[in-house]
Amino acid sequence: MHKPSLIPDFAYDPPDVPLSILHEDAAIIVVDKPAGLLTVPGKLENRKDCLITRLQAARWDALTVHRLDCDTSGVIIFARTKQAQGFLGQEFEQRRAEKTYVARLKGRLTPDSGTVDLPIGSDWDYRPRQKIDPVHGRPAVTDWQVIDRASHETRVRLTPHTGRSHQLRVHMLALGHPILGDQIYAPETLAEHSRLMLHAESLALHHPTTGAWVRFTAPSPF
């Protein structure tokens, strides 16, 4: 028997903010995505407003390369040609791209750094929730480094080495320190945090035209 979902209905209310373009040239466009905006359109009619649609209204040739979760803010890259799109796709697929995130976690995480190496798979009865799944999950690895601690929370820098759905959120939950403001994995924190406290701080990869190693950053808004 199918279990009823415990995940609350996703109320989509995208922010009405201007595009924040960090860099653009003939091959790529780098944007600082706001929290609460889908990267690509959702399946339902009221989820058509998204970052790629807004970007293509201003830059008609923008092409999707990767995604950030709706509730995550920060650096995301788009291609401007099919060739650049294919090159950048390989940067992610071959794990050459380097990403760092800043997050605020529930509780005081110790020690000062570590690695989570736990496979992740879909929790089919409670989609879109993901879970640690040693049997059917796909390999997932995340490094974490403490930036600062407060009385009831910890600020960390996260470096994923794989790109599983909800990877950072599930791995921090597995440590017993979920990301604050997470409506799926830490709903008890929503009263004090109006957004998911997860921000894509930097993205580094090879430029599709020059081959040079380039890095793009956006400071955390929290």
Image (spheres, grey):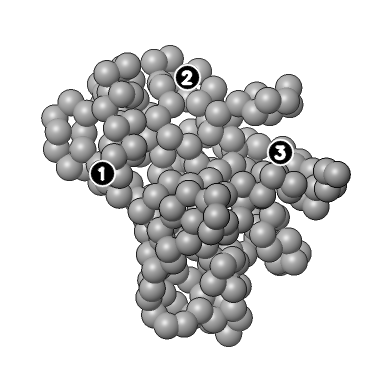
Give me the disc on residue 56.
2
Amino acid marked by disc 3: Asp
Q: Is residue 154 above or below residue 143?
A: below
- Residue at 63%, 35% (x, y): give it: 16
28 left or right, relative to 55:
left
Q: How many marks?
A: 3
- Mark 3 lies on a secondary structure that is loop
| Mark 2–mark 3 distance (CA, rounded to whole Å) | 20 Å
Image quadrant where one finds the N terminus: top right
Residue 187 coordinates in the image, percent (x, y): 73, 61
Residue 221 at x, y percent in the picture: 50, 56
Cα distance in 3D space between marks 1 and 2 = 27 Å
Q: Secondary structure at mark 1?
A: loop
The residue located at (72%, 38%) in the rendering is 12
Residue under label 3: 13
Amino acid residing under circle 2? Gln
Q: Earlier in the sequence, mark 1 or mark 3?
A: 3
Label 1: which residue?
A: 96
- Image quadrant where residue 182 sits: bottom right
State which mark lies toward you, 1 or 2: 1
Left or right of 76, for residue 150: right
Asked if the residues shown at circle 1 and circle 3 are in contact, with their CB atoms under 8 angstroms apart, the answer is: no
Residue 85, quarter of picture: top left
Closer to the camera in the image, 221 or 77: 77
Q: Position of residue 48 (x, y in %)?
A: 65, 24
